[in-house]
Image (tube, rainbow, N blue to C red):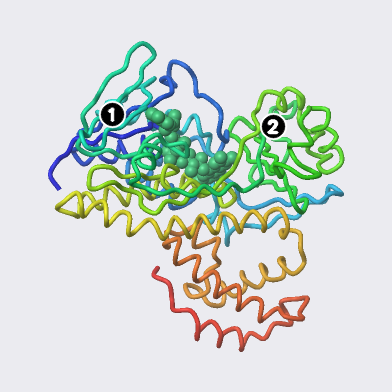
Amino acid sequence: MKRQTIHIAGAGLAGSLLAIMLVQKGHTVKVYEKRPDPRKAGMEGGRSINLALAYRGLYALHQAGLDDEVMSQVVMMRGRMVHDLDGNCNFLRYGRDDSEVIWSVHRGRLNLAMIEAAEKQGVEIHFNARIDTIDFEAKTLRIQYFDRTETEHYQRLVGADGAGSAVRQAMVSGGFVRERLESLGHHYRELEIAPDLSGDFKLDGNSLHIWPRGGFMCIALPNSEKTFTVTLFLPGSGEISFENIRSPAKGRALFSRFFPDVLDLIADFDHDWTHNPESQLSSLYLDTWHYRDSVVLLGDAAHAMVPFHGQGMNCAFEDCLALVEAIERESEWSGVVSAFEHERKANASAIQAMALENYVEMRDKVDDDRFLLQRALERRLAELHPGRFVPRYTMVSFRRDAYAVAFERGKIQRRILQTLTEGKTDIAEVDYGLASELIHRQLEPLNA
Ligand code: FAD
């Protein structure tokens, strides 16, 4: 497609990556970001401090030439370290070996690196520039700065302005899009584990730690400065809930009962509890992601999801790649928008569903004997039938199989695992002849 001027709402994770990819293809890109320039004001908090980066996200960064810079600031996470109430740990590797891992990355530093790269490559970024009204017929944006309001004309507008997207809200208000926001009913709050006295990690630095406690849990992801960001996920209401546990004293009481080992590691619990907000979690579903051929949504603006598969950013990065590929491939913008939405919408729904399922797995199942048996068998079957029986987590996190494919194959594989482990307590008891028959009958080989 011939070179275009493209306006992007939001210089967050998706907006800044998309801007870089588009400018590299020769388009003119203007980005409007409501926050101040992070190089002058520091990164604002509000959302998770760190994120898990997986293969598909890294692949998209690689296409933009950003992977080396990003990889210089990440921490490898080889698997889940599951902590029980008695303080015992059980390590569950994510993949086969260190070629199948995920990476903890600092949100603020990642965003900063992308903003810098975008500007260096010629993207025009306006900070303190909040899009507040859109006239879809006149194709104008009203942008609110500290001291003034400006109107900007656009031809093509991408809404990459996150879960609370103003572009989406304007589309909803205009009756062009219908949205459904499903609250998880569980909220989160972040706390910090500082390094030990020698400046090292206080827990294993290459694991994602989980303290599953049935209806709720804590997790901790390592940061490159040897701290951990702990996230407490708790119901919003009910007996053990944020509604009932408001004060730091009640928070401490909750931790000393259910997470005593975590409490021992947090230097200033009351400070973190008081200063870090309690935030909500929701999944967002839209009937369409575009308006005519002039406006399209991507990332959280189109499909915000709960964070339990660590894929929201990875999915948003893959959206950017898909949109740029569609722009390269199609001759008309209407073709771009429909090809992009056709490719990405079913995949976004699939990862939204898998993310919800993973919450139950993380808080309820990772210490359950039947789950552990099925997981051990899953790994054995993956060794015996490479390319055909591929664990769902592997398809999502270490490969670029479409999320919808991972979701559908995952259902088939789960049924096979259930059949094979019925009444068994050890994978040595499994009928591997039957396993082979079921796998070959139900699963075609995956593309390499
Ligand atoms: P955002 O990153 O939210 O960026 C949107 C940008 O738009 C922001 O900069 C915002 O300031 C700007 N903006 C908003 N409104 C306006 C406006 N009116 N005008 C101009 N600018 C505006 N994902 C993973 O892949 N791995 C993880 O481990 C992971 N963990 C998570 C943990 C938690 C607790 C949460 C909440 C999310 C997690 N995610 C994770 C999801 C991830 O954070 C999001 O999917 C990702 O940030 C989406 O990127 P985005 O660019 O679409 O939105």
Viewer-side residue, 25 vs 277 = 277
The first of marks 2 and 1 along the sequence is: 1
Up-down relation of residue 70 to residue 194 (above or below): below
Q: Residue furthest top?
A: 147
Please name the residue shown 44% across and 50% down the image: 315
Give 271 or 182, whichever is nearer the viewer.
182
Instruction: Tell me the element at label 2.
Output: strand
| Labels in figure, total | 2
Quadrant (top left, top right, bottom left, bottom right) of the C terminus? bottom left
Mark 2 vs mark 1: in front: 1
Q: Position of residue 425 (x, y in %)?
A: 78, 76
Residue 296 in view (yes/no): yes
Residue at 36% over, 17% down: 145
- Crowd rating for badge 2 (residues with CA inside 10 Å; few <14, some 14–19, many 20+): many
How far from the left and from the top, in percent, is residue 426? 76, 76
Task: Tell me the element at label 1.
Answer: strand
Q: Amino acid at mark 1?
A: Leu
What's under tag 2, amino acid-wise? Answer: Leu
For residue 191, the mark is 2
Estimate the spatial distance between the alpha carbons at disc 2 and disc 1, rounded to whole Å.
Answer: 38 Å
Q: Which residue is mark 1?
A: 141
At x 72% / y 60%, what residue is drawn?
365
Is 180 in front, or is 40?
Answer: 180
Query: From this viewpoint, is residue 65 visible?
Result: no
Q: Is residue 390 above or below residue 198?
A: below
Viewer-nearest residue: 300 or 52: 300
Residue 310 location (% of width, % of height): 55, 48
Q: Disc number at residue 438? A: none
